[in-house]
Image (cartoon, rainbow, N blue to C red):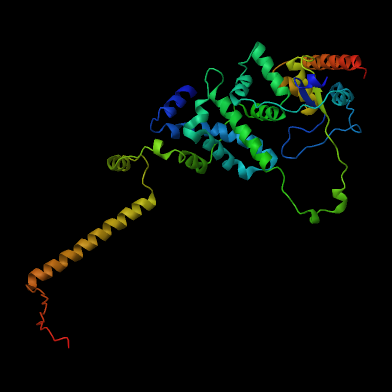
Amino acid sequence: MSGEEDIARLLGGERGAWAAFVKRYAPVIYAAVRKRLVPAGRDTDVEDVAQDVFVKICANDHRLLRNYDPKKARLTTWLTVIASSASIDHLRRNARPTSSVDSVPEHHLSVPAKEPAWVTIPDGLLSPRQALVIELLYKGDMTAAEVAEKLGIDPQTVRSMHHKALQRLRARLADEGL
Amino acid sequence: MRGMAKQSRSYQASRYGDQVDGARESVVTEENFNSADEGLDRDLLLRAARQWPQNPGAETIDPLDMAAFLDGRLAGEERDAFEARLARDPEGRAVWSASAAALGAREPVPKSLLRRAEALAPDLDVERPTLWQRLSGLLSSPRPIGGMGWAFATALFLAVCYGGFELGQVGYMAARDGSTQTAYLEQLPFEPQPIF
C-alpha cells in the first residue's frame, strides 16, 4: 500500500487507519529522531520527541497530513524532514544546561567577545548553487567531498564552483575599491 | 549599496555552525581565520562581511519542498530557487543536513511509543473485538499451553471435582436423614404506648 493510500484511508476516517499508519511509519520517525538526538547526548528524549511528531500529525484533524502532496515527495522522506525538524527544535529549546554563575571559576567567565561576521552578498552575484556551496564550506564547516555527497555532485565540481564564486567575490570587492 | 542589501542574500563568514547542541561552536575571527583546507579564503569572506551590510532574514522552508529536494524531484528553476533559499537559511540547512543523514533509515520502535501514538486517535481508530470474536480467538489460539497452563487447568479441574463431591455428599446425607432445619421468625406483639 502506498503512502497516498495510507493517508487517504486516514483522512477518510477509516477504522484502524491511524493504528496502521503508526505501525508503518513509526520506524521512520523514530530513526530520524534518534539520529539527531543520540549524538547530542539526548537518548532519553527520543521517545518523547517522536511522540510529539505524532501529536503534530494528529493535531487539528490531521491538518499537517492534508498539506502533504504525494506528487512532490515520498511520504517517508517528508516524515523524515518533519521528524528531523522537530528534533532540532527540541535541541534548540533545551540547548544547554544552566548552572549558577557562582559555581563557575572566575577565569572561565572572562572570555573575550567574538562577534560572527555576516556577509551579505548582492543578489545575482553568485548562482544559487555557488551560494549554497560557499555556505556549506564556510559556515557548515564541511569539506568539498561532504558537500559533493550532500548535493549529489562530483567533488571536483564543488571545488570549481567554490573557485568561481571566490573569483566573483574578489572582482566585486575590487570594483568597490577593497 | 544599502538599497541593494534589502534584496540580497545573507552569509555568515564564521563557524557559528548548524550545530545546535553546543558540541562544536567555534567562531572564526581574524586570528584563526586562514585555513589551508580546501583552499578556503576566509579573509575574502571577512572583507565581504565588512563591505556589505547584514541581512540575516530568511523565509521558512516548507518541509514538502525540502522533501522534494531530498528526493531529487526539483529541477531547473525550482531547484535553483530552493538552493538559494537554503543558502540563506541556516536553520533550513540544519534540517536538510539531519534529514539527508536519516533518509531511508528505519529502527525498531519501543512498544510504549506505539501504544502512546496509537492512543492519540482512539475514537477514530481502535477496532474493538466483539465478545464472540474474543472467545473464538481464545479457542482458536495458536499458542500452545505451557507447563504452568496445564498445572493451573489440572488444579482447577480437581477443585471443581472436590467441590462437587462435597456438595453431593451433603445432599445425600440430608436426603437420608430426612431432617431439615427450619428457622422460625418470632412475631412480637406490637402495642402502641402513650407518648406522655
The residue positioned farthest toward the top in the image shown: B76
User: Where is residue A112 drawn, in percent x and y?
Assistant: 88, 42
Please name whichever residue, A94 or A43, is drawn nearer the observer in this view of the structure: A94
User: Where is residue B43 drawn, in percent x and y?
Assistant: 89, 25
How many numbered marks, from 0 up?
A: 0
Residue in the picture at 55% in, 22% down: A74
- Which image quadrant: the C terminus of chain A? top right
Residue in the picture at 30% in, 55% down: B154
Please name whichever residue, B153 or B35, is drawn nearer the observer in this view of the structure: B35
The quadrant holding residue B73 is top right
Query: Image check: B10 left or right of A94?
Result: right
The quadrant holding residue B66 is top right
The quadrant holding residue B55 is top right
Residue in the picture at 73% in, 49% down: A98
User: Where is residue A78 drawn, in percent x and y?
Assistant: 57, 26
Seen in the picture, residue A42 relative to A29 is either above or below; the reply is: below
Seen in the picture, residue A136 relative to A55 is either above or below; the reply is: above
The residue positioned farthest toward the bottom in the image shown: B196
Seen in the picture, residue A131 relative to B113 is either above or below; the reply is: above
Residue A24 in sight in this render: no
Residue in the picture at 61% in, 21% down: B65
Residue A105 in sight in this render: yes
Please name whichever residue, A109 or B172, is drawn nearer the observer in this view of the structure: A109
Query: Image check: A156 left or right of B189?
Result: right
User: Where is residue B14 drawn, in percent x and y?
Assistant: 82, 30
Please name whichever residue, A148 or A124, is drawn nearer the observer in this view of the structure: A124
Query: Image check: B165 left or right of A139?
Result: left
- Which image quadrant: the N terminus of chain A? top left
